[in-house]
Image (spheres, helix red, strand yellow):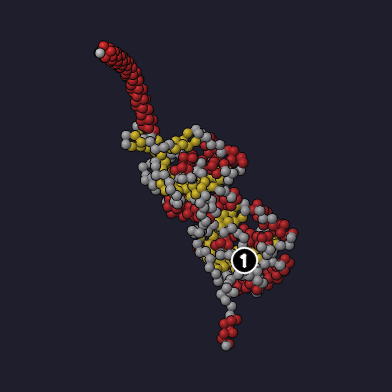
Amino acid sequence: MSSQLERQKRPSLKDIELKKAATGIKGLDEVTKGGLPRGRPTLLCGSAGSGKTLIAMEFVFRGARDFDEPGLFVAFEETSEELAANVAPLGFDVGELVAQKKLVLDYIYIEPNEYEETGEYDLEGLFVRLGCLIDSVGAKRVAIDTLEALFGGFSNQAILRAEIRRLFRWLKQRDVTAIITAERGPEGALTRHGLEEYVSDAVIVLDHRVTEQVATRRLRVVKYRGTRHGTNEYPFLIDQTGVSVLPITSLGLEHQVSSERISTGVPRLDEMLCGGYYKGSSTLISGTAGTGKSSLAAHFADSCCSRGERCLYFAFEESVRQIVRNMKSVGLDLQKWLDQGLLQIHASRPSFSGLEMHLLTIHSLIEEAQPAVVVLDPITNLMAVGDQVEVSAMLTRLIDFLKGREISALFTSLTRGGENTESTDVGISSLMDTWLIINYLENRGERTRTLQVLKSRGTAHSNQVREFLVTGEGVQLLDVYLGQGAGLTGSARASQEAKEKSDALLRQQEIERRKRDLERKRATLQAKIAELQAAFEADEEEIRSLLEEGQLRQAAEQNHRIRKSASRKSKEP
């Protein structure tokens, strides 16, 4: 009976599940599966310029503003005024929260050269100060930046270790969710003192890495007691809205799908795809240089804006003005959509930043613009800042992100002459729902474009290879033309068409001549028929006259016989 009561009082796994405090930082809550451990300290370590102070500040700022959890930020290296000025460009109005008594900024001046280490050293004075500041606003979140400034002037490692333990323990006893920043140690060590990571319930390492002259900030959760968390390295971006962390792992294959069709911008291509692309699908257009990939992409963007929807266009080869000018040559006025805000063109060289930074930038711009269509032209240029595996992984995450938002995406890919056109340098063709291939055909001293639908998942589509023209009125697709047992394009097609028109004209002229001959023969025949008819009628009239004459003669003879007979009878006695 007692054991049964004990089992009933024993908390369930759900009841003892670690509680978390959402950071409000984009992507970090996803990586940590909900946020930082509530009521426990988290160690945030990294080298200079890795973003420690900013993440700590955003944690307490968003807690006070968005989650009604007042915060305290204690700095040992920057004054309160300097902190407020540094984060103001990111949209963090620290002064307003301070005035509302939701946030406290405190600067503690410590200069190692101005004091001597003597006697017993402890943090009791700091605890008293922190306690007063926490009580002044009822702080639930605390950030301490940094440990090195607090302990940097002391050489007694035993005292340091003891006081570091006391600091972390004291924060736990106050039941505050805390972030403590620390500098990275030498030769790859997490921290300089080598103890902080052991007494912390969670440890997050920041890294500012430069690879082939391209710098990327990365974040990794090294330790998180009592809960599962992402263990990979995650790039993060510091922009005008704060920190954005992007998980490397894919978002999965649980996105919604739509049966709605959207136009490609080219009516004949819509016919080939039985109505256009599926909404929310991904399309790849590949081909050699100059085949018209960008023109097709611009038609798709123009079609999107014509429906009153937003389009985000990422260009990796041409500037915005150059794209607008070039597309005028094919009858597209993209400037009007730019002026109306329906089209945004983000032009940059791939070498401007690393792959992960490009991905984070794309995410950020999509979050801001909320487009219905996204175009990347061309994705093969990303190979300049990463190998095929890295580019493929980056684009895979991007495709999953777009599909999760039901955003229709179009990618162009450059293939080099002589290569297998049914492959791509970045190796993502298998991820695409629709794949269009544009080729050049060389014949009789000229090159003509052809387009074919290599695949289009979930829909019937044309299997024809159609001639592809880029004209002043836009892209045009011609019907398949067969001549001499093969498909003809360009001047060969024009020559064959001219020959067939000439042959048709000659046949028509021959038919007209024969019709005239037939009419003459018909007239001659009708004249002969009339002549014979007249002769026949004359003969018929002559015969009729002879018959009538014979009938009259016979009647007369009959009358004569009758009279003669009557005369003989009258003479008899």
As drawn, the residue found furthest toward the front would be: 573
- Name the foreground residue: 460 vs 442: 460
Quadrant in which residue 272 is drawn: top left
Where 514 falls versus 17 (above or below)?
above
In the rendered structure, the answer to whether residue 543 lies left or right of residue 90 reads left
- Counting every numbered tag in the picture gives 1
- Name the foreground residue: 355 vs 404: 404
Q: Secondary structure at mark 1?
A: strand
Rendering coords of residue 457 (x, y %): 44, 51
Residue carrying label 1: 21
Q: Residue at x 59, y 49 (%)?
A: 369
Quarter the C terminus occupies: top left
Rendering coords of residue 98 (x, y %): 72, 60
- Name the foreground residue: 196 vs 422: 422
Q: Residue at x 56, y 75 (%)?
A: 13
Neighbour tally class for label 1: few under 14, some 14-19, many 20 plus, Cα within 10 Å: many
Rendering coords of residue 210 (x, y %): 51, 54
Q: Residue 278: tell me if it is visible.
A: yes
Where 6 falls versus 540 (above or below)?
below
Q: Residue 290: tell me if it is visible.
A: no
Rendering coords of residue 108 (x, y %): 68, 63
In the rendered structure, the answer to whether residue 357 lies left or right of residue 446 reads right
As drawn, the residue found furthest toward the bottom would be: 1
Where 412 falls versus 329 (above or below)?
below
Task: Kindly identify the amino acid type of the residue bearing the numbered disc 1.
Answer: Ala
In the rendered structure, the answer to whether residue 472 lies left or right of residue 449 reads right
Q: Residue at x 62, y 69 (%)?
A: 38
